[in-house]
Image (cartoon, rainbow, N blue to C red):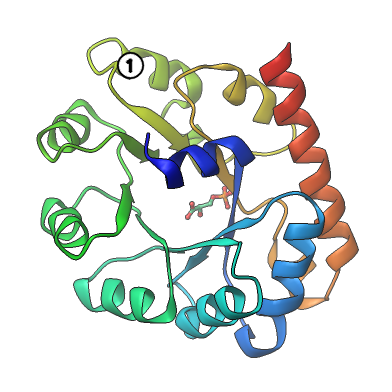
Amino acid sequence: MNALQTRISGIGVVPVIKLNHPERDAVPLAQALIAGGVPVAEVTFRAAGAAVAIQAMRTNFPDMLVGAGTVLTTAQVDEAMAAGAQFIVTPGMDPDLVAYCQKVGIDVFPGCTTPTDYHTAYKLGLEVLKFFPAEQSGGLAKIKAMSAPFPMFKVMPTGGISLKNLADYIKNPVIAACGGSYMVTADLIDNGKWEEITALCRQSVEIVKAARNG
Ligand code: 3PG
């Protein structure tokens, strides 16, 4: 893993964020995540204004790691990078999009769940993959099965991760970090429940630490 991947893995959880009001919410949200020990965010392009949020977080919190999620096109890669995004997450495996990210020099974590996806990732020289949607695709059992023929990858499972199953995932050495929206739900963000977000982040970090030390 490179320096960025090692940092993400060290934090252990990546909040997957959809902001309906990026101008209003990006900065207090980033503050809440940092206060909870989670200075990383995947800001998804499934809401308009993702680039605005990325830029606001990067400008106000230069030490925070901010990536763009749900990236489907090269134009979105460009937009994310112009806003200061440090990594790209794509829901599926699009070899052309991955190659574009590699060409322009930004880390990319494509969503992979099948032997074909993994094989494509291998040919592209990737080391860390998003495993999405994790629970719906077979969860940890599938991740373990996939790591038999493909032991070279670390994965970031996302989709159905919560405080309940976080420890089980994190304990497995194949897992680089877990992604999820459970600590940044629409209800929490839209109602400005920043302290609750911080508390959920703290709980997540404790679970990661305990799982790794145990
Ligand atoms: C993602 O895009 O990574 C997922 O939508 C997040 O999944 P979750 O909402 O089940 O955590």
Identity of the residue drawn at 23% across and 71% down: 73
Please state the horizontal and vertical placement of residue 54, each as a whole percent of the image: 52, 75
Mark 1 secondary-structure assignment: helix
Q: In which quarter of the image is the N terminus?
A: top left
| Residue in the foreground of this view, choosing between 120 and 32 | 32
Please state the horizontal and vertical placement of residue 56, each as a whole percent of the image: 59, 82
Identity of the residue drawn at 25% across and 30% down: 114
Asked if residue 28 is positioned above or below residue 118 in the image, the reply reads: below
| Residue in the foreground of this view, choosing between 31 and 130 | 31
Asked if residue 139 is positioned above or below residue 109 in the image, the reply reads: above
Q: Quadrant of residue 123?
A: top left
How packed mark 1 is, by other alpha carbons closer than 10 Å (few <14, some 14-19, many 20 or more), is: some
Asked if residue 96 is positioned above or below residue 18 in the image, the reply reads: above
Q: As drawn, is 143 to the left or to the right of 37?
A: left
Q: As drawn, is 13 to the left or to the right of 107?
A: right
Label 1 C-beta lies within 8 Å of the nearest ligand 1 atom: no
Specify the amino acid type for callout 1.
Ser
Identity of the residue drawn at 42% across and 80% down: 83
Q: Can residue 86 be seen in this view?
A: yes
Q: Quadrant of residue 171?
A: top right
- Residue that carries the numbered disc 1 in the rendered image: 147
